[in-house]
Image: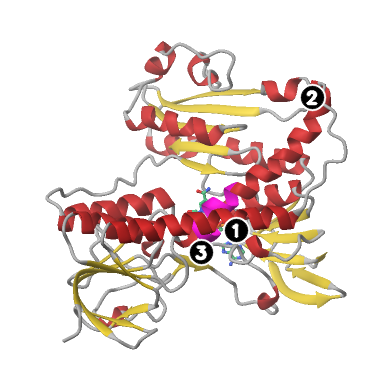
Amino acid sequence: MPESFDLFVIGGGSGGVRAARIAAGHGAKVALAEEYRYGGTCVIRGCVPKKLLVLASRLADEFERAPAWGWQVDGARFDWATLREAKDRELARLESIYRDGLSRAGVRTIDSRAVLDGPGRVRLLASGETVGAARVLVATGGTPYVPDIPGAGLAITSNEVFDLPELPARMVIEGGGFIAVEFACLLQRLGVQVTLVYRGDLILRRFDDDLRRHLDAAMRDAGIAIRTGETITAIERWGNGLRALTDRGAALDAEQVMLAVGRVPNTNGLGLETVGAEVDARGAIRVADDSRTTAEGVWAVGDVTDRLALTPVAIREGHAFADTVFGAEPWTCDHEDVPQAVFATPEIGTVGLTEAQARERFARVDVYRSSFRPMSNVLARRVERMLVKLVVDRDTDRVLGVHLCGPDAAEMIQLAGIAVKMKATKRQFDQTVAVHPTAAEELVTMRQPVDA
Ligand code: NDP
């Protein structure tokens, strides 16, 4: 008789780990299989190592600002290998926390690729063994999309960039989304000369237009070459490096080319057809609000469902699934008004509707906007400005969106997100006394709409 579990989780990333631990806490017999490293994209090659690199890169700005504040920082020099190794130690520490958390919760961890093998069965490819599973949760995440162009294999993606043996002198990055923009900013500050190639006319397509323009200008000021309306059509070896050819006839030479043109759900070869779980045209598993797939006894959470590809969302989806199915507490993850950050420099914090979305849905929209030099730049005579913007429904006075670009925008938007989620009005923002002197005080001191 094969061993049997109440729940078998495929994938040890943010969503799968949370679901497994909570389900085990509700008394279920749970197994979780992971083919690579525990922690998933977020911990191993996403949010966490990226943020470490971002923090390291911003020290470049501090060194530049320091003399105006009376500090002499002589001989500052960056060493990639030191940072890479420190980052690897931190990831190993976090991975072991994930593993320990699972075993403390009583979850059986299996280091193997696992695939569905018909209703109620999961096959472990490392041992060839098949186990029984009353319920299966697929939480296999996503992987970088690599376009089918000649020489694509010469390029790197966000999977490889964290472990480069050395930083290139020049890098061409394709894409205008989260990953392309974040890496362009951090690598430029670590001393790489970055060229960003984006097919659209302005980076970060789904974001508020003022934010997009503000960040685009700041990135250009930082020395990043941004080429819009252009696509890489081929990559070839050139001298000791590479050459990216574009549809506008350009030949861009660099030691590395990075493709950051989106991610695709990890559903290939998972055996979804053996249980009848449907996928959409992009390969994402179709799910209902409660993460139920079209197959009986199979659920899916996180990036593999292509709803909102963010770690905290996957965690909530996994938690809601476990409480609903194994606890006495049904709930679903709310995908509305999710605060988001882009860890560019300057960073973006955003929640709610963009101005354009608000104007489509509401008859009368007021916009409050302020742009100023943060104090950290004043003595150093740096020109970068901070942008603070509120989008308000004039009829109900409700704040529909908050959009920030500048230092600490990600920290600020977490808090502004509470107010937006509570459907706070502009009047309630205004009734809140400012914290002075801060950049965040602009959120509660803007009185005059820009279009009045
Ligand atoms: P995004 O969807 O954010 O961006 C993809 C970019 O690639 C877009 O600019 C898109 O252009 C462009 N693109 C897509 N297909 C092609 C193509 N065939 N040729 C040329 N360009 C193309 O994806 P990312 O890979 O940057 O990130 C994946 C997801 O991971 C994000 O959407 C986000 O959910 C998550 N993430 C979150 C982070 C955070 O919270 N800070 C950080 C990193 C990732 P267009 O705009 O024209 O469609």
Q: Are marks 3 and 2 in contact (CB under 8 Å)?
A: no
- Residue underneath mark 3: 263
Kindly tell me whether residue 103 is visible in this rendering: yes
- Residue underneath mark 1: 88
Mark 3 vs mark 2: in front? 2
**Picture residue at 16% right of the left edge, 50% below the top:** 330
- Residue underneath mark 2: 380
Mark 3 → mark 1, Cα distance in angstroms: 23 Å
Report the magenta stretch's main SS.
helix
Q: Quadrant of residue 239?
A: bottom right
Q: Judge the density around disc 2: few (<14), some (14-19), many (≥20) Cα neighbours within 10 Å.
A: some
Mark 2 → mark 1, Cα distance in angstroms: 34 Å
**Picture residue at 48% right of the left edge, 17% below the top:** 444
Image: 351 above or below 95: above
Helix or strand or loop: what does disc 1 sit on? helix
Q: Judge the density around disc 3: few (<14), some (14-19), many (≥20) Cα neighbours within 10 Å.
A: some
Please state the extent of the stretch shown in magenta in the rendering: 43-51
Image: 121 above or below 59: below
Kindly tell me whether residue 373 is visible in this rendering: no
